[in-house]
Image (cartoon, rainbow, N blue to C red):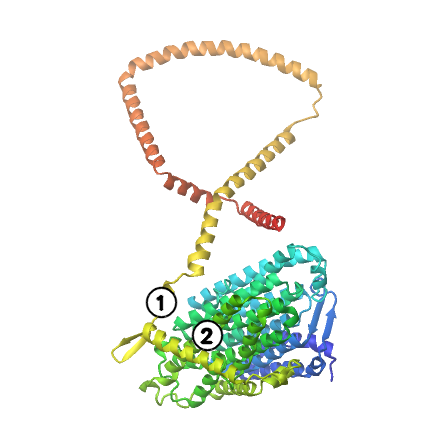
Amino acid sequence: MFLSAEYILIAIILIPAVSAFIGLYIGIKSEPARNAFYTGVILVVFALVCTLYPHIREGGSIRYSLPGIMGTGLFLKLDMLRYVLVFLTSFLWLLAHIFSTHYLLKYKHRNRYYMFFILTFSSTLGVFLSEHILNLFTFFELMTVTSYFLVIHDEDEFTHKAGNIYITMSIGGGLVQLMGIFLLYNYTSTLLITQLPIEIAELGNIKYLIALLIMSGFGVKACMFPLHIWLPKVYPPIPSPATALFSGVLTKTGIFGIFITLQLMNYDKSLSFMVLCIGLINMFLGGLLALHHRNIKKIFAYSSMSQLGYILMGIGLIGLLQDHSYHIYYASVFHMINHALLKTLLFFGSGVVFMVLQKLSLNEMKGFGKHMPLFRFALAVGFLGTVGLPGFSGFASKTMLHHAIYESTVIFNGYIVGFIEVIFFISSAFTAAYLLKIYTTLFHEDNKDYAEVYKDFPHEYAIIPMLLLSGIVIFIGIKPGFLLNAIGYSEAYNLHLFTTKNIVNALLISTSGLGIYYYYINKRLKVYEGSDYYYINPTYHWFDLERNLYIPVISFCFKYISLVLYGIDNALVFVASSLSSFGKYLFSIDFYKDISYYNRLVNLFFTMKTRRLHHKRNIESLVQNSKGNIESYVHNNKDNLEDMVQSGKDGLESIINYEHKISDDPKTNLKQKIGDMSFNLSSITYSIILFALILSILLVLMLMI
C-alpha cells in the first residue's frame, strides 16, 4: 500500500475537499471532463476506504492525530461503526453522482452544484471520522453550510423558504450544541471522545444538561421529534440525488451523534429511556403523517422520520439493556444500513418521476410507470424492503429490532412491553399502507398519456444505480448473515430469522397495512369525480408544531419582553449619559488658578452681594414701569384678550377630551407603548440583555440540577 492506514484517514477527507475547487475550474472549460473528474475522485476515495477494511475486520481501530489544527489538534479514528458509515457514504455518494449527471441536464448552475456536492461529501466523512468533540462539531457545521447550497440550488421562492428553515434549525441546534460543548470542557478539561466517559462518570446531575444540549444539535439532523419540522419543507425542493443523500447519509450524522453522546454518558438509563420514547413517537407520527400526504417526496420524508424512529428505539434499548444489548446494537446498525440503501433507492425513484413530469403530487402521476418494467421492478424492491417482507433486507433488521422488544422484558413490565409492541406493529402497518398508496398510483392505474411516450425511460445513468441498489437489497434480504458477519456480529450465522413465527408476523403486518389502505385511504382520503379520483390531505388543518406552537411562542416572548428590555435599556442609557455629563463637568473644572481657594470664596461672596443689591434696584424699577405699561395695554385691548382666553379654553377642553378617550382604551394605549418601545431599543443593549437572560436561565437550571 502506497499510503499507511493512518494517512489514508486524512487523505479521504482532503482529497474531495481540494478536488471540489479543481473540479470547479475544470467545469468552466468542459462539463463532461468535470463529471469524469469528480467520478474519479469519489472512486479513489471509495477504493481507499475499501483498503482499510482488513485493519478493522478483527475489531481493530485506526487513529491519526495532527497537532495545531483547530486550536486543540485534529484527531481521527476509524472503528467498525465508523467504517460502516464511511463506506456507506462513499458508496452512495458515487451512485448519487452518477444519477446526478443525467438528472441535472436541464438545471442551471450545475458547476456550483457539483462543487458543494463534493464539499458536503468531504465534511460528512469528517463527521464520521472525528475522535474529538470540537473536530466533530466543526465538520458537522461545515456539512450544514455546504449542504445548504444544495437546498437552495433552484434559487426560487420555494427553495429559499426551505433553505431558511433548514439553516435556521441547523445553526440554532448547532449553537445550543456549542453551549453544551463549552460546559463539557469546563467540567472535564478534555474533549477527546475516548477519555470523556471516564471524566463524565464523576460528574453530578450537570451531565444531563450537557447531554441534552449536545443532543439537540444532533437531533435536528436525526429528525428527532419535536425537531423534525424542517424535514417535509426541505426535502421536496432539493434535487433528488441530493435528497437521497440527505435521507440516506446526512440523517446518519445525527444518529451517529446520538450514539456518541450516549457513549460519552456511559449509556445513562434516563437518557436512554428518553431516546427510546422519542423513537416511538418518531415511528408512529412519521408513519401517520406519511399516510395522509400526496407529495411523493413529503411521503418519503415522513417515512424517513418513521424509519429513523426504529433506529432511535434500538439505540435507547442499548442503554437500557446494557448487559443484554449485544444483539440490539447490531440490529440498530443493520437497520441504519438498510435505511440508507432503501431511502436512496426510493428518492432516486421520485427523481425519475420528477425528471419527466416536473410534478410531485400523486394526483398528477397516476399510471406513470405502468409501462416501465425496470423502473417498476426497482421501486417495488424498495417498497417491499422498507415494509420488511421476507426476502428483502428490511425484514432481517426489523425482525432483529422486534426481538429486542421481547428482550426488554428484563427491565419493563408486561404493559410497557405490550405498548412498545403495539406502536411497533401499527407503525409498520402504516409503512405498508402509504407505500401501497404510491405503488398503486404509479403502476396500477391506466393512463393513456403515458402508454407509449416514456416506455424506454429512464436513462441508463438513472436506472443503473437503482437496479444496483435493488440487487443489494435482495442479496442482503436472502443472506443477512453475510452483512452481519462483515460488520463484526459473531452470532451472525446462528440467527434464525426465517422462522414461521417471524414470517407470519411480517405477513400479518403487511396484511394490516393492506387493510388500512383499503378501509381508510380508499374510503376517506380518496375523492371520486366520475371515473377519476384525487387524494385529499386533512393534516393541513391539524395541529402544527411550527405554525401553532413555535411561531406564536417566539412572537409572544419577543413582543412582551420588549417592555422589560426597554426599561433596562433606558436605565443603561441614563446611567451612561449621566456618567458622561459628570465626566465633562470634572474635566471642565480649572484646578490651577493663581488665587487661593479661600480668596476665591471671599471675592465670590462680595461680588454676589454687590450684584444682588444692584439687581434688586433695577428689578423694582422695571416692575414699576411694566405695571403701568400692562394696565395701559389691557385697557386698550380688552376685547381681543377676552377672545384669546375663550379660544384657549376651548382648545384646552378638546385636548382633555382626547386624552380621556385614549385613556379609556388601555389595551390600545399599552399596545402602542410596547410597539414604540420595541423599536426604540438600542441594538447593543438588546444583545447584552438577551445574552444575559440566556445565561441566567442556564444558571438557574444548573442550580436546580
Q: CA distance from mark 1 to mark 2?
A: 18 Å
Q: Are marks 1 and 2 in contact (CB under 8 Å)?
A: no
Judge the density around disc 2: few (<14), some (14-19), many (≥20) Cα neighbours within 10 Å: many
Query: Which mark, residue 101?
Result: none
User: Going 56% across and 69% down the picture, which residue do you hit?
Assistant: 312
- Three-letter code for the amino acid on which mark 2 is drawn: Phe
Left or right position of 666 against 681: left
Q: Is residue 380 above or below residue 416?
A: below
**Apparent side of residue 384 relative to residue 272 in the rendered image (left or right):** left
Label 2 secondary element? helix
Q: Is residue 154 visible?
A: no
Q: Residues within 10 Å of mark 1 (few under 14, many from 20)?
A: few
Q: Residue 486's spot in the image, x, y percent?
A: 64, 83
Image coordinates for residue 227, horizontal then vertical, percent: 51, 63
Q: Which residue is mark 1?
A: 538
In this figure, which residue is indicated by the disc labeled 2? 300
Instruction: Indicate which disc, 1 or 2, sits on the residue closer to the N terminus.
Output: 2
Task: Identify the image quadrant of the N terminus.
Answer: bottom right
- Say which quarter of the image contains residue 541: bottom left
Residue at 28% over, 23% down: 646
The quadrant holding residue 216 is bottom right
User: Front-most of 575 and 528?
Assistant: 528
- In the picture as drawn, the residue positioned furthest to the front comes out as 414
Position in image of residue 120 (x %, y %): 58, 72
Describe the element under mark 1 as helix, strand or loop.
helix
- Placement of 454 over or under 84, stated as above or below: below
